[in-house]
Image: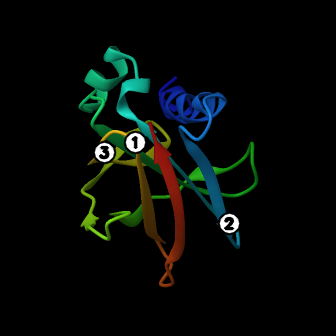
Amino acid sequence: MRLSRIVLLLALSLSSLALPMLAAAQSVTAGDITVHYSAIPTTTLTPDVARQYGITRSASRALINIAVRKGKLGSDVAVPSKVSATVTNLNGQRQSLVLREVKEGDAVYYLGETRIDGHETLSFEIEVTPTGRSEPIRASFRQEFF
């Protein structure tokens, strides 16, 4: 049931969509590869989940979660990838995020944390190069945190 952990993290991201503008859960597809990404305040994680993944649970922290999948939904498989992400605040301050790869059974995903300051809007840029491919897949999104 290790795949259920990635599903849990993504579900936490999706469930927080009920709170207006709190989280974005999105994806981009290039050929048979789909990159899923979301950003959430770390306070939306339970203490047990945060502890299990070594995530700092704080009102001043946000988590980005990236998963790379190949194939059609339902029969897709995880694809190890080279993943990088940057975050920029409204003042133009840009930071490269440190992402760590998490492998659990057949699941592979990438987690990174960044600081948030109260009510803040951050712009994320993601670059993913799946194993066996030379061209990266790029995505960008803005996320407002409260």
* Image marks 3 and 2: residues in contact by CB distance under 8 Å: no
Going by the numbered disc 2, the residue's amino acid type is Thr
Q: How crowded is mark 3: few (under 14 residues within 10 Å), some or many (20 or more)?
A: some
Task: Name the secondary structure under disc 1.
Answer: loop
Q: What quarter of the picture does the C terminus occupy?
A: top left
Q: How far apart are marks 2 and 1 (CA)?
A: 31 Å
Residue at which label 1 appears:
119
Q: Which is in the foreground here, disc 3 or disc 1?
A: 1
* Image marks 2 and 1: residues in contact by CB distance under 8 Å: no
Going by the numbered disc 3, the residue's amino acid type is Ile
Residue 130 % position (x, y): 48, 69
Q: Check the image and name the residue furthest to the bottom.
A: 134
Residue at which label 3 appears:
116
**Label ID, residue 29:** 2
Left or right for 61, reference 130: left
Is residue 117 or residue 96 the one in the foreground?
117
Task: Name the secondary structure under disc 2.
Answer: strand
Task: Name the secondary structure under disc 3.
Answer: loop
Number of numbered discs present?
3
Image coloring type: rainbow
Is residue 123 or residue 54 the one in the foreground?
123
